[in-house]
């Protein structure tokens, strides 16, 4: 799977925060709406840090297609704006 660059940066920031928290992982992440995409990105980029994910009314990859159709803005992963990292 692909993780858009901005999500990759956010995933790295959250992973660093969790690792510095002093709490013992792996963690169960909960993500609401776009936070669900971030939880998935953390799981993809830092698999050893995540034991599970709870998605609450989360957006999915179809959201990118619909968003682009109505706004003309492409947030979908592409070789120019994302990093290849694996698949959940």
Image (spheres, rainbow, N blue to C red):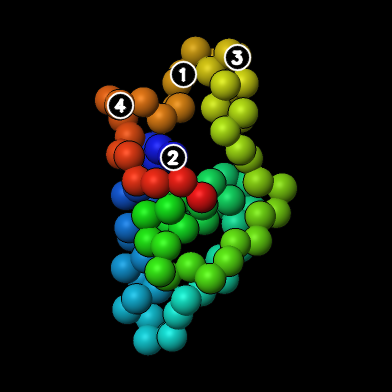
Q: Are marks 2 and 1 in contact (CB under 8 Å)?
A: no
Assess disc 2: are there few (<14), some (14-19) or many (≥20) residues with their C-alpha within 10 Å of its C-alpha.
Answer: few
Camera-nearest label, 1 or 4: 4
Q: Tell me the residue at 36%/70% (across/down).
A: 17
Which numbered disc covers residue 33? none
- Distance from the alpha carbon under mark 2 to that under mark 1: 21 Å
Q: Quadrant of residue 79?
A: top left
Residue that mark 4 sits on: 79
Q: Secondary structure at mark 1?
A: loop
Q: Position of residue 70 (x, y in %)?
A: 60, 14
**How many numbered circles are shown?**
4
Which numbered disc covers residue 73? 1
Q: Tell me the residue at 45%/27% (across/down).
A: 76
Q: Are marks 2 and 4 in contact (CB under 8 Å)?
A: no
Residue that mark 3 sits on: 70
Q: Is residue 9 visible?
A: yes
- Distance from the alpha carbon under mark 3 to that under mark 2: 24 Å
Q: Position of residue 34 (x, y in %)?
A: 57, 45
Residue that mark 2 sits on: 1
Q: Are marks 1 and 3 in contact (CB under 8 Å)?
A: no
Q: Are marks 1 and 4 in contact (CB under 8 Å)?
A: no
Of labels 1 and 4, earlier in sequence is 1
Camera-nearest label, 2 or 4: 2
Q: Tell me the residue at 61%/30% (across/down).
A: 63
């Amino acid at each position: 799977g692909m993780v858009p660059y901005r999500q990759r940066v956010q995933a790295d920031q959250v992973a660093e925060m969790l690792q510095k928290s002093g709490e013992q992982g792996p963690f169960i992440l909960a993500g609401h709406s776009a936070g669900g995409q971030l939880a998935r990105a953390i799981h993809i980029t830092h698999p050893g840090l995540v034991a599970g994910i709870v998605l609450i009314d989360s957006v999915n990859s179809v959201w990118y297609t619909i968003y682009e159709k109505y706004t003309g803005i492409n947030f979908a992963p592409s070789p120019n704006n994302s990093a290849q990292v694996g698949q959940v």
